[in-house]
Amino acid sequence: MELLEMVTQKIGAKLVEVTTRQGNIPFYRGDLRKSIVYQTYKDRVIIGTNLSYARAVHDGRPALTFGPKRAKVLSWWTDPEKQRQMLPFPKNSKAFREMVKGGQIRVARRVKQKARPANPFFARALQTLRQEGLGFLKDDLELYLITDLEKVLRG
């Protein structure tokens, strides 16, 4: 592996590690944290995620109102554990109404979400890496230079 490729690989891996540190990236289920990846192209490192909501978390977003696309109302479990497990609602409309009356299921025609402030976890990670420096490359660079010098000395 060429020196430049090795250095960009190491920097990419370190940048992912810094980005996914506890306290830097928002953590609910861990999906955003697990989705952080990097790619290298010669002398460049590109870090990113494939989750659609990551940009809204990183850059923030304005307040929005949304409603159902195909149904008459939106519905969700009031119990966070059932919501987290994404349990299906009862198919029987009578049972569904009883659960709504009992407070187990909430329904609404529209939901208003507050504006989400920006949480620039990528920018913070880059700043942290700048502050910590590139000392983590020391051992690899020394090894590379030693083997390179040995090749030169052997002739």
Image (tube, rainbow, N blue to C red):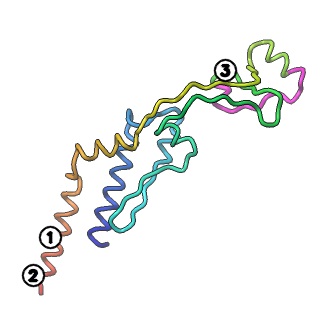
Above or below, comparing residue 8 to residue 27 in the picture: below
Mark before the other along the chain sequence, 2 or 1 = 1
Q: Secondary structure at mark 2?
A: helix
Residue type of the residue flagged with mark 2: Leu
Residue beneath disc 3: 79
Crowding at dot 3, Cα within 10 Å, few <14 / some 14-19 / many 20+, comes out as: few
Above or below, comparing residue 67 to residue 124 in the picture: above
Residue beneath disc 1: 146
Residue type of the residue flagged with mark 1: Ile
Q: Residue at x 46, y 48 (%)?
A: 36
User: CA gap, disc 1 to disc 3?
Assistant: 61 Å
Crowding at dot 1, Cα within 10 Å, few <14 / some 14-19 / many 20+, comes out as: few
Say if mark 2 contacts mark 3, CB within 8 Å: no
User: CA gap, disc 2 to disc 1?
Assistant: 10 Å
Placement of the C terminus among the 4 image quadrants: bottom left
Q: What residue range appears in magenta?
A: 81-95
Q: In the rendered view, does 85 fall on the left or right side of 140?
A: right
Q: Which of the 4 image quarters holds residue 83?
A: top right
Count of marks overlaid on the render = 3
Mark before the other along the chain sequence, 1 or 3 = 3
Above or below, comparing residue 1 to residue 118 in the picture: below
